Amino acid sequence: MTSTDFDTLVNEALHAAFSGWDFSYIEPQRWRTAEPPWDYPAQVRAAFATARSALDMGTGGGEFLSGLAP
């Protein structure tokens, strides 16, 4: 990507109207995603098996982690 392309993308983002975590204004061809090579829910369940407490930081209301608790 050239600096001109980068500057254009940054300028578009700065002027885009969005709220919260809604990035639907970004066209699908402008981003890529892939699943991680590990299973996060399985790792959390394994950690919960021996944990006396858990702290959910910065992920919202904790609904996801509470759904994994025994």
Image (cartoon, helix red, strand yellow):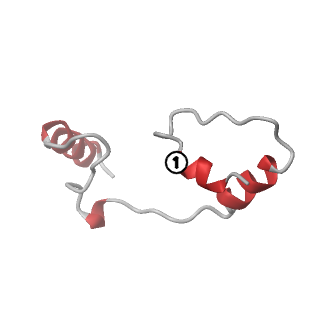
User: Looking at numbered disc 1 in the image, what kind of residue is underneath it?
Assistant: Glu
Which quarter shows the C terminus?
bottom right
Instruction: Give the quarter of the image for residue 25.
Output: bottom left
Where residue 3 appears, x then y in whole percent? 28, 42
Give the residue at x 79% y 48%.
47
Where residue 52 appears, x then y in whole percent? 82, 36
Where residue 11 appears, x then y in whole percent? 17, 39
Q: Which residue is mark 1?
A: 63
Give the residue at x 45% y 62%.
33
Instruction: Give the quarter of the image for residue 35.
Output: bottom right
Looking at this view, is 19 or 63 the one in front? 63
Left or right of 8 on screen, residue 63: right
Left or right of 69 on screen, residue 16: left
Rendered position, 63 above or below 61: below
Give the residue at x 67% y 64%.
37
Disc 1 residue crowd, few under 14, some 14–19, many 20+, Cα 10 Å:
few
Query: How many numbered discs, if any?
Result: 1
Looking at this view, is 20 or 5 the one in front? 20
Give the residue at x 53% y 42%.
62
Looking at this view, is 42 or 2 the one in front? 42
Instruction: Give the quarter of the image for residue 21.
Output: top left
Can you name the residue that lies furthest to the front here? 70
Where residue 26 appears, x then y in whole percent? 24, 56
- SS at mark 1 in the image: helix
Looking at this view, is 29 or 19 the one in front? 19
